Amino acid sequence: MAKKKGREFICGVHAVQAALERGPGRVKRLFIAPGRKGQPGVQARQLAERERILVEECPSGGLDELAGSRQHQGLVAEVHPTPIFGLEAFLEGLPPEKPPILLLDGIQDPRNLGAILRTAAALGAGGAVWPKDSAANLSPTVAKAAAGAIETLPLARVTNMARAVSAVKEAGYWAVAADPEG
């Protein structure tokens, strides 16, 4: 997420709409480009107004600054922090049927992380775990590429992936790995 003086932002049509649909309390304020017409802009404005979320028109340059990018599609939302769990809380929150979970190591490109999270959510994964170091952080770029998946997919960050794999196996999950080096 873009963080400006303790504030967190997400951008893009799907990411913002998913945050608005998540329910009351996730979105603090919606910033929308003047003249943002079309169904996505109208829908986002209606969802925000229904939840009594302040909607502000903001010129494109202001949206660029809030989003940390020009790729905001005319919608930026100031949000409360995205919940990121520790491994123990993450595992405790998973349903008893043990859905597949992703253990991601070395994913440094934010667009790749977002695309993986989006695909995982679409395929019914129970969540995703990745390291705190040497990996992409959540950002507006990740949120936009994830197209709303960070609003529905439980997420965890860990300091040691080897211990995370062991804990996941102890919790009754199978561990299957792929390595780009073969």
Image: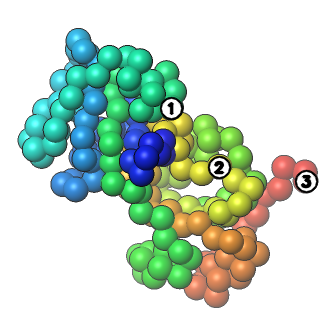
Task: Name the residue tied to disc 2.
Answer: 136
Task: Name the residue tied to disc 1.
Answer: 68
Please tell me how crowded label 2 is: few (under 14), some (14-19), or many (20+) other residues with Cα within 10 Å: many
Task: Left or right? Give the position of 4 relative to 36.
Answer: right
Question: CA–CA distance between discs 2 and 3?
Answer: 22 Å
**Type of amino acid under label 2:** Ala
In front: 107, or 57?
57
**Type of amino acid under label 3:** Gly
Q: How many marks?
A: 3
Residue at horizontal 59 percent and vertical 66 percent from the top? 157
Q: Secondary structure at mark 2?
A: loop
Residue at horizontal 53 percent and vertical 82 percent from the top? 88
Q: Nearer the viewer, mark 3 or mark 1?
A: 1
Q: Secondary structure at mark 3?
A: loop
Q: In this rendering, is residue 35 above or below 65?
A: above
Residue lying furthest top in this view?
A: 35
Residue at horizontal 84 percent and vertical 49 percent from the top? 180
Rendering coords of residue 65 (x, y %): 45, 28
In front: 31, or 113?
31
* Residue 71 in sight from this viewpoint: no
Rendering coords of residue 164 (x, y %): 67, 76
Please tell me how crowded label 3 is: few (under 14), some (14-19), or many (20+) other residues with Cα within 10 Å: few
Task: Name the residue tied to disc 3.
Answer: 182
Among the two numbered marks 2 and 3 on one chain, the one whose residue lies closer to the N terminus: 2
